[in-house]
Image (cartoon, rainbow, N blue to C red):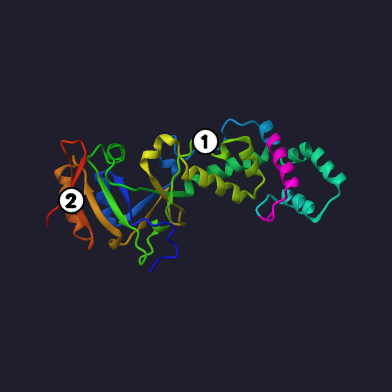
Amino acid sequence: MRSPNRTHERQSFFKYTEAATAIAVLASRTLRWSSPVLFNDPFDVPREMSFGLTPADIVQAIARRLADLIDRPPQDTSGLEPRVRVLIDLVKKGISPELRADLLDGLKETASSLRPSGASMEELRSMWRSWLPDFRILCLTESPAHLAMWYHYADQYRGVVLEFRCDDELDSPWLAAKPVTYPIAKPAVYSADGWAGLLMLQSELSIQTMLDVATYTKAPDWSYEKEWRMTSFKRPTDTGPFTDYKFNAKELAAIYLGPMISPANRNAIIALASGYPDVCVWNISIGMNRELEFNAVEG
């Protein structure tokens, strides 16, 4: 039976981690979803939404956007900022050519009334700062066999990769995972026109748009990661910038032991694996061909 929450056709995802973290995950049957404030990578989710744009840039961009909306009003205006929605709904009801010309001539004043030089821009930035600590992200990937991932995310080959099934019957949360994209061109919200578009939306839609862009896009240099992400928000009982969510033991499909894992960590993980009914444990070694070799752990 296919889960209604499934958004892709993948059968599993992989989590690279240090051995100590893997032991904690296996012992508690939880995965940690973290706020971006904990991310070490400064090129990941931005802490500030500034992008070096000036208020004058935004005013001009808003004027252009409003002119386009007046010339080609959208069918659905429900997501627009209330003042913009009133204006565009009035245009849709039919106005004289003279009034349309007056509106277009007065766009600078209309744009200025949106206060992009003060409260509007700062309101979005302030909301962004306040949302980040409460935002939660779980990062997974498509393969357990990437050397750079083993080095950077699994303690320089001393760590572990955990494989999680996308189980329709259990309605696994990663059924709703979204792939990260790696566009060559910067997303629109990095431009004055993009900011103008945000300021003309309702505040919650603006923040959601920024969250989607910040969460699911990265620079092309990171495309080798083939990353997928799930997002959530903090629970009322959370006291730190992370949330530990339980997973079902049947969702753990395999454990891959790094080629340089310590004997103590190896033994601890194998012992914990016995508590998972459908898991396969693999030893990974580096062959003479400088590629990873996978061999099932006996017993």
Number of marks: 2
Asked if marks 2 and 1 touch (Cβ < 8 Å), the reply is no
Asked if 220 appears above or below 265 in the picture, the reply is: above
Q: Earlier in the sequence, mark 2 or mark 1?
A: 1
**Given the current orientation, which residue lies at the most extreme bottom position?**
1
Q: Secondary structure at mark 2?
A: helix
In the image, what residue occupies the spot 48% across and 35% down? 184
Please indicate, yes or no, whether residue 94 appears anywhere in the rendered image: yes
Residue ID for mark 1: 185
Quarter of the rendering containing residue 37: top left
Quarter of the rendering containing residue 244: bottom left
Residue 247 coordinates in the image, percent (x, y): 33, 59
Mark 2 residue crowding within 10 angstroms, few (<14) / some (14–19) / many (20+): some
Residue ID for mark 2: 268
Q: Main secondary structure of the magenta part?
A: helix
Looking at the picture, which amino acid does disc 1 mark? Ala
Q: Nearer the viewer, residue 117 or 89?
A: 89
Residue 42 coordinates in the image, percent (x, y): 44, 34
Residue 156 coordinates in the image, percent (x, y): 25, 37
Q: Secondary structure at mark 1?
A: loop
Q: Quadrant of the N terminus?
A: bottom left
Q: Indicate left or right for 2 with 255 as reference.
A: right
Asked if 166 appears above or below 256 in the picture, the reply is: below
In the image, what residue occupies the spot 68% across and 36% down? 61
* Magenta-tinted stretch: 60-78
Q: Indicate left or right for 43 with 16 as reference.
A: right
Looking at the picture, which amino acid does disc 2 mark? Ala
Q: Is residue 68 magenta?
A: yes
